Image: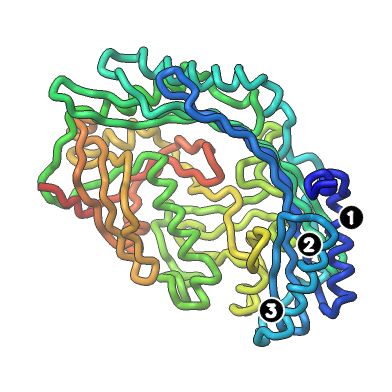
Amino acid sequence: MTTDELSQQLDLNSLAQQVVERALQAGATDAEAVVYEGDEFSTRVRLGQVETLQESGSRAIGLRVFIGQRTANTSSSDLSESSIRRLIDGAVGLAKITSEDPFAGLPETDEFGSLSGDLGLYFDDVYSLPVEQRIEIARRCEAAAMAADTRIQNSSGADFDAATSRKIVVNSRGFSGEYRRSYCGFSVSPIAQDMTGTMQRDYWYSSARHIGGLESPEEVGKEAARRALRRLGARRVPTQKAPVVFSPEIARSLMSNIFDAANGDAIYRHASFFAGQLGEQVAGENVTIVDDGTLVFNGVAGFGTSPFDGEGLPTRRTVIVENGVLKSYVLNSYTGRKLGLRSTGNASRGLAGTPGIGAGNFFLQPGSITPQQLIGDVKSGLYVTETMGFGVNLVTGDYSQGASGLWIENGELAYPVEEITIAGNLKDMYRNIVAIGNDLTFRSSSASPTIRIEGMTIAGS
């Protein structure tokens, strides 16, 4: 019997329980097993022809053991008896020779738990469409983009993806939990070309937990075309200080720096400008930032929703910044102990390594004005649709990114711009968010409405 045939016969929950018990028998004082299995499908179409088609499935287990305050981790995708034995022996053997860490350990027993009820995480219809129909969705999306305008004669391709997964967490302190997730989505990247031969590319996409949640391939294709076409004729602008409006996609990235700055690991290492700032004003009074791992929209879980975190603690809603005041860091058990605080249920656990810190559904609460009103107040400024590079320093707050977008004149989007840099300091930028749109939409686990920041430096010609 092959390893794969054997693994298919295994009760994965029982396997996790057995691995924990056997780790204790081998000398561990505590143990935690994580089992993952998943199936993935992806196809890529370019100019109507299938370029790639992949289907895969995987199963794997990770084991974390403690011997007092010594800890070690091992993982394996081989679930045969001999491999499981090596997994346990290897983890216990490694733990015996590692250094003690006074903050190491599983959470306390009374902290464990899981959200009850059906959160709408899993829908089995993501694989209900035959493969040809999945390919056809990608084809339709690309065809719609290319039919939108004669200036679009090429494409980087269109994709369709689907995936399901199951995660099981079991530990020696009585916690046992599992959940399944599903995902499907498609995207397209058309290329527009003007009369001078200059080409511009953009993209758009739709993603959901179930097939019924996906948008029309034709509408997504048209939107991708619109985004590519509006970049044609881009120019540079003179260096200046001006208001900068961040589109929701870019504002989302800018706001994610708040999560990174509030990360307990960065805080205790003093690698964040939020260190020592709990209770202090760190943003404008109109800014409220929330991380919520419990969100459900009309019976469908948010992309960052789960019943428990990577350590088996129930997920929760955490207000990180409220009316501009830093209210909470985001923590797992380890960083919580380091800082003398309790975990916020943000442990992120893969199969190998120690738990990290991850977001649930992370978002900036929306304002009350439309994006058009927000832009309409700008006499001269920049609407950012893309940023490039890694110019963010969380220690100092310095921010500098290559950018492109559309220039605003007298409250209207006037012409495309590129080859510019926007710069500032996050500590000032968050305080200078003068307007927040009402267009909050979750297209992934993090989201932001349109925002406007005053007084940023735009470096151009």
Q: State which mark lies toward you, 1 or 3.
A: 1
Amino acid on which disc 3 is placed:
Ala
Q: Earlier in the sequence, mark 2 or mark 1?
A: 1
Q: In the rendered view, would you say 45 is above or below 444?
A: above
Residue at 71% over, 39% down: 121
Closer-to-camera residue (275/191): 191
Label pair 2/1, CB-CB below 8 angstroms: no
Closer-to-camera residue (426/387): 387
Mark 1 to mark 3 CA distance (whole Å): 26 Å
Please give the residue where the numbered disc 3 appears in the rendered image.
104
Q: Quadrant of residue 193?
A: top left
Q: State which mark lies toward you, 2 or 1.
A: 2
Residue at 86% over, 77% down: 26
Mark 2 to mark 1 CA distance (whole Å): 16 Å
Position of 141 compared to 183: left or right? Answer: left
Please give the residue where the numbered disc 2 appears in the rendered image.
83
